[in-house]
Amino acid sequence: MDKEYEILKAALQLFVKEGFHGTPTSRIAREAGVATGTLFHYYKTKDDLVIALYADIKEKMARVLETAVVWKKDFFDTFRSVHLNMLNWAMDHPTEFRFLEQFQTSPFLAFISAEEIKKQTAPHIALLEAAIEAGAIKASPPYLLYAMITSQVFAVYHYIQQSNLSSHESRQIIDESFEMIWKMLQ
């Protein structure tokens, strides 16, 4: 048994279900099948565990997106590929996506350095900057555009999850939402 993996897996499930502050480390350890001391061997504090889980999920998501996104000269197709793959990843990993959403609106976000956030967003910001420079989208601050696009992805995901749509209907909503986001960017 990979104890660290089991701790992260248990923490993910409990944090999403009970919240960060509503989940005691003793319960995480129990769910992971390890002693509380073992949990603290890997993570000195619960804050460290929350941040490590965030980093783990972001890294896994980034790897999937790097391999799945098709980078083309046509910005419309590239942005569409990013949009589709972000939503596909979210739908395939609903617990991880929910954790990221919780994290983004929590005080824990302040523990992530500006350098780390820049590193995580660098490919997206570079794409936005290239599209702005080419005149494919409005000349606006790239980080503002990134924030707007990200919020739309969360909104589309929630709409699909709450609407009990068929696979075909979900795909149609994803396509339509991209068209709306693209128009917003132009």
Image (tube, helix red, strand yellow):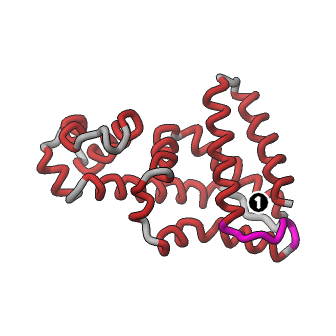
Q: Residue at x 56, y 54 (%)?
A: 64
Q: Considering the whole magenta stretch, tell me its main secondary structure.
A: loop
Q: In the shown orientation, is residue 86 left or right of residue 141?
A: left
Image quadrant containing the C terminus: bottom right
Residue 153 drawn at (x, y percent): 66, 47
- Residue to which mark 1 is pinned: 78
Label 1 sits on what residue type? Answer: Thr
- Residue 30, located in which quarter of the rendered image? top left
Q: In the shown orientation, is residue 144 left or right of residue 25?
A: right
Residue 33 drawn at (x, y percent): 19, 37
Q: Residue at x 14, y 45 (%)?
A: 36
Return the residue found at the far front.
107
Residue 183 drawn at (x, y percent): 86, 53
Q: Secondary structure at mark 1?
A: helix
Residue 28 drawn above or below residue 125? above
Q: Is residue 29 magenta?
A: no
Image quadrant containing the N terminus: top left
Total marks shown come to 1
- Residue 147, located in which quarter of the rendered image? bottom right
- Residue 138, located in which quarter of the rendered image? bottom right
The one of 94 and 64 positioned closer to us in this rendering? 94
Packing grade of label 1 (10 A; few <14, some 14-19, many >=20) is: some
Q: Residue at x 53, y 59 (%)?
A: 63
Q: In the shown orientation, is residue 47 left or right of residue 109?
A: left
Residue 129 drawn at (x, y percent): 74, 73
What range of the chain is rendered magenta? Answer: 135-143
Residue 162 drawn above or below residue 97? above
